[in-house]
Image (cartoon, rainbow, N blue to C red):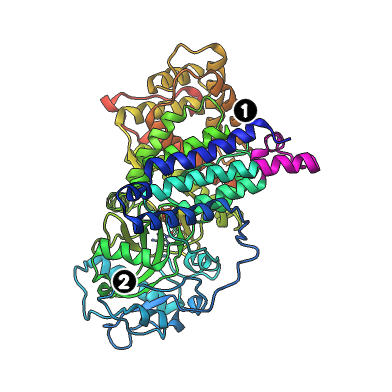
Amino acid sequence: MVPFHDLRRLASGVALVALEAAKRSRAVEAARSGDVAGTLTSAVLAATDLAGLTKGTIREVSAAPAPAPAPRDSVVYFSGDAPGAKPSPATRPDLAGDSPISEASAAPEVEASVSGSEDAKDAGFGGELGHSRGVDEERDHVAEDNARERNNDGASGHGGESSRVGVVAAEKKRRRLRERRVPSTPFSRALGFAGLGAGLAWGTIQESAKRIMYGMPKTDDKRSTVSPFLSDQNAERLALALCRMRGAALKLGQMLSIQDESLVPAPVLAALDIVRQGADVMPRSQLNAVLDAELGPGWTSKLRSFDYEPLAAASIGQVHHAVMKDGLEVAMKIQYPGVADSIESDIENVKLLLNYTNLIPKGLFLDRAIKVAKEELSRECDYLLEARNQKRFRELLSDSEGFYVPLVIDEMSSRKVLTTELVSGIPIDKVALLDQETRNFVGRKLLELTLKELFVFRFMQTDPNWSNFLYDEASKIINLIDFGAACDFPRSFVDDYLRMVVACANSDRDGIIEMSRRLGFITGQESEVMLDAHVQAAIIVGLPFSKPGGYDFCANNITPSISNLGATMLKHRLTPPPDEAYSLHRKLSGAFLACIKLRAVVPCRELLLHVHREYKFSGDQTEVLSTAAS
Ligand SMILES: Nc1ncnc2c1ncn2[C@@H]1O[C@H](COP(=O)(O)OP(=O)(O)OP(=O)(O)O)[C@@H](O)[C@H]1O
């Protein structure tokens, strides 16, 4: 027998589809007003969305790439370069031939020269000649550097060569991404979620039936054994749908994917790993439409070349390699259409799905977290804001050894397109494969940066995604990218937060309780159980800072202890954490998780004491560390 609650889920899923269709359907409106063509278009769109979202076919991500479509050249070169300067496919062997990206439908007013690509010719790309304006001194310098590096060793971007440092670009290209249109209207997005809900419900019923026929699946994960909802197929379905939807939904999926198994069930985590590896790719027609609308139809006149095969398909946009007229290699991040306008509804829809599935434990104060996520995501969709953040960090870190923030190219940037200097390097999870000395160095640098951002700049990039730190082994520089999520912290908050970290480092119970109250983590009315759990968690988080000398993140894995205490705190918590805490703690735990991943040994206490010594508290109060601190 199929359990009743599964039938109810299916019914709810179907009801949701019907409800959304009725509520938001342009088709219905069109039909009412007699627009038959509109009705048909919307119906077809809806059907495609549903089909795509409920299939749940397993995607081979890395082990066995999907068969390549007919070979194509994805790079389009534009005419007007100085003689001899025109890059040819031969200089980019990684691009030879096999792009999975399909047909072009390009900006009609520019015509193409080159590359022997039929696509480019069909697309009618071409040259507005001799343009090179607004190139400042710094930019010239960077372009020259890059040209020199390219001549020397063929590596691209800042930070240069090293056979081991796989250029991220080349590495990412080896993965075959799936090309699918982004559902860009509120209607198609809502239907997408509804379809997913129905798909999950159907998957649950299938799983229940399977269990009746063949018994329980063998797995260590208790929750997946208990709930037929948490089948591998359903988890896969969820991941595929998120990759297709992109936008806020995918971002939330990526956030969940770096959580540990005590919060998110294992099969879902495994599926979300797919999500972390990148979204589907938007077709050229959608891409060109965004570029034309944002940069004007003459955008190609500023480029020597543009590669239609993306370096990366991220949650909010996809990133393409291009070369500016002056030879500077750049990364162009192009936002998926419709995602900025659908943050609110996407998140509401994800919430609905989470409610269906009971995936999130009670006590997480989800509403508050969701409010913060919405605000963060809308900021992240504004690439002009990201450009400003990036310039600010470039300035702040200009004297900090070991870090580099790439240049922003204003003339090729807008609210939905962000063009920055291309940098190279390997993300943190790849650094984890290097020698101990390198891992220690990178771990130390990451913690140093985190402390500096919070306690010196009071301005922090709050997205700890491992790919946002690209380590260039040859120059020993960490190239920093992705400043979409960044925020200022008020001085009074930072003052008390530093006092709290020091109290944690010194296992100072009274200090922890007092600062936690002042910062708003507790009300002061909590039960003893809650206070104990809170203090214990704080002391565990402070452990790396508790003793002089190198702290070995590999030998002391603190994640499980925190998860256990986390459960107690969720049960007894009286107040949600302050708004500042969501992104700050994501970043801090991200820095710790990175050090754990790197199995690094880092003199954390020395780093903290250094920051504390240099810190000026407001009101110029002299802060003395307790004797245990020295
Ligand atoms: N300047 C750059 N140089 C080299 N690669 C880059 C650059 N900018 C972006 N990339 C590549 O594109 C990927 C996505 O870029 P970015 O992180 O800025 O996008 P995002 O939409 O903020 O992504 P996320 O979904 O991780 O938040 C990076 O992980 C990196 O591989």
Q: Is residue 456 left or right of residue 277?
A: left
Tell me which image quadrant ligand 1 sits in: bottom left
Reading the image, the residue beneath label 1 is 564
Give the residue type that dot 2 points to.
Answer: Ala
Q: Which mark is residue 158?
A: none
Residue 174 place in picture, x, y as percent: 55, 68
Give the residue type that dot 1 points to.
Answer: Asn
Residue 614 place in picture, x, y as percent: 35, 36
Q: Secondary structure at mark 2?
A: helix
Viewer-proximal residue, 550 or 270?
A: 270
- The range drawn in magenta is 205-231
Reading the image, the residue beneath label 2 is 143
Residue 259 place in picture, x, y as percent: 56, 40
Q: Does the rendering let one see residue 212?
A: yes
Q: Is residue 535 left or right of residue 490?
A: right
Seen at 41% across and 79% down, the residue is: 119
- Quadrant of the snapshot with the N terminus: top right
Q: Secondary structure at mark 1?
A: helix
